[in-house]
Amino acid sequence: MGTILLVITLILEIAFSAYCLGTKQNHKKMKNWIRIAIFIAFILLTLTSVVEWSFRWILLAGLLFILAVIATVSLIRNKTNTKTFKASKVVWKSIMMIFVFVFALTPAIVFPQHKSPKVTGEYEVGTAAYTYTDKNRIEEFTDNGDNRFVNVEFWYPKNAHETYPLLVFSHGASGIKTSNTSTYTELASHGYVVVSIDHPYHSFYTASEDGKTALMNDEYKSEVANANKDGVYTNEEVYGLIQKWMKLRTDDMNFVIDTILTKAKSDNDPIYQLINTEKIGVFGHSMGGAASVWLGRQRSDIDAVVNIDAPFFSDLVYKKDINDFVARDEDFKTPLFNIYSDDVWDQLDSNSTYVANKADNEHFKDAYTVHFKGAKHLSLTDLPLFSPILANVIQGGKADIEQYYCIETENELILQFFDYELKGIGHFAPEKTY
């Protein structure tokens, strides 16, 4: 919609300038009426939901309102236009106005209006956000001695009267807790309480209940970027970074799960009373997927794990004598479902940080694994729908898979897996490739 409106704006602005140049007149009164008409048209498009009001339209709405007010005042004053016609001035004003409209429409172009992936469950879904403060940990990314806070958001079945399995999600290396909103919504609509975690200073941005914000830490950002480049770190240094990242992630997840389990017993908040504390699943994308697999080894109360496009950091061992990584020699016993894009699938046979993910690893012989052919790393999140431009820039190009097919199929498979493992519903026999 943003691109369409920009094209319409360019056509109108260029056409009006050409008309002024052709007639050698300023046509100020006509321009004023056009400005007012455009503002009214935008209001009508918003009221009829052709334009779905959101942050992406604020700049454009403000610009159109200002132009309409100026035009209205000009028409009311009804001053005779005595200014001499200058072709260069008409062209210059037109160019400036085009730049202003491009700026105002940038949010709508970068974050285009899009339809939400389908939701197939019977329950209406509610959301709620909380901030948990861990009194046993001091925040390592700041020097003020404050305890670490963790922001979470719940997606849960509204108007429900039973208890439902708890699913805990962890985002990617620089993601946010809403990265897979369509997945949480689909799961909650089928009777799950989903909580997604913002890992402060690992997430791109997070805001707590009291308004405190935290951006991704620059040192951490640099570590992640350089760990993916050859020659910056030794294998031993990479292994040390992995241990550090995973400790923070798993500490956050353990803290959130333990907090929720405690609140389910003692807090009268209706959301906590919806939780079946005997059925817990964890899942995550990228680094969050790695942390989820780690928790699957660490906690005895985790009943199912979904790993979305991540290495098994929990099963990575650094051998100093060969200066390389090897897989841990111990069976993984928690039910596990792996979902891979091309970006990760192509690395599974390499002796890299994905060495434990190899298909011939007997310690994961019971795990389910699927490959979304043509998908890129971020195809397994909602970002390509929310902002195709950003997704393509971050992941180095456009994916070959159709995004709605990808995310809706992924959501369906995750639902089927958790239904089978946590509710004993149906059977789970996914295809190897989608």
Image (cartoon, rainbow, N blue to C red):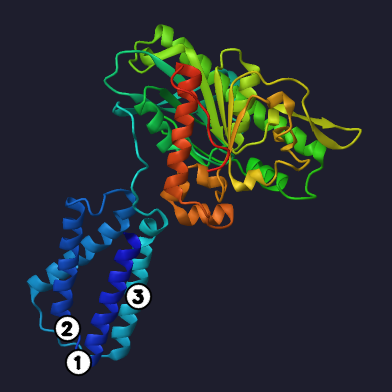
Residue 24 at least partly seen: no
- Tag 2: residue type? His
- Secondary structure, mark 3, is helix
- Tag 1: residue type? Thr
Picture layout, residue 407 above or below residue 164: below
Q: Residue at x 17, y 51 (%)?
A: 47
For the residue pair 221 and 348, the one nearer the viewer reads as 348
Q: Residue at x 54, y 56 (%)?
A: 393
Question: Mark 1 or mark 3: which is in front?
Answer: 1
* Few, some or many residues within 10 Å of mark 1 (<14, 14–19, 20+): few
- Tag 3: residue type? Met
The image quadrant of residue 100 is: bottom left
The image quadrant of residue 349 is: top right
User: Do tag 2 and tag 1 residues touch (Cβ < 8 Å)?
Assistant: yes
Give the residue at mark 2: 27
Ranked by sequence position, the earlier of labels 2 and 3 is 2
In this rendering, position of residue 40 left or right of residue 172: left
For the residue pair 397 and 80, the one nearer the viewer reads as 397
Q: Which mark is residue 96?
A: 3
Ranked by sequence position, the earlier of labels 1 and 3 is 1
For the residue pair 46 and 284, the one nearer the viewer reads as 284
For the residue pair 113 and 18, the one nearer the viewer reads as 113
- Secondary structure, mark 2, is loop
Task: Give the alpha-carbon distance from disc 2 to disc 1, as whole Å.
Answer: 9 Å
In this rendering, position of residue 102 left or right of residue 168: left
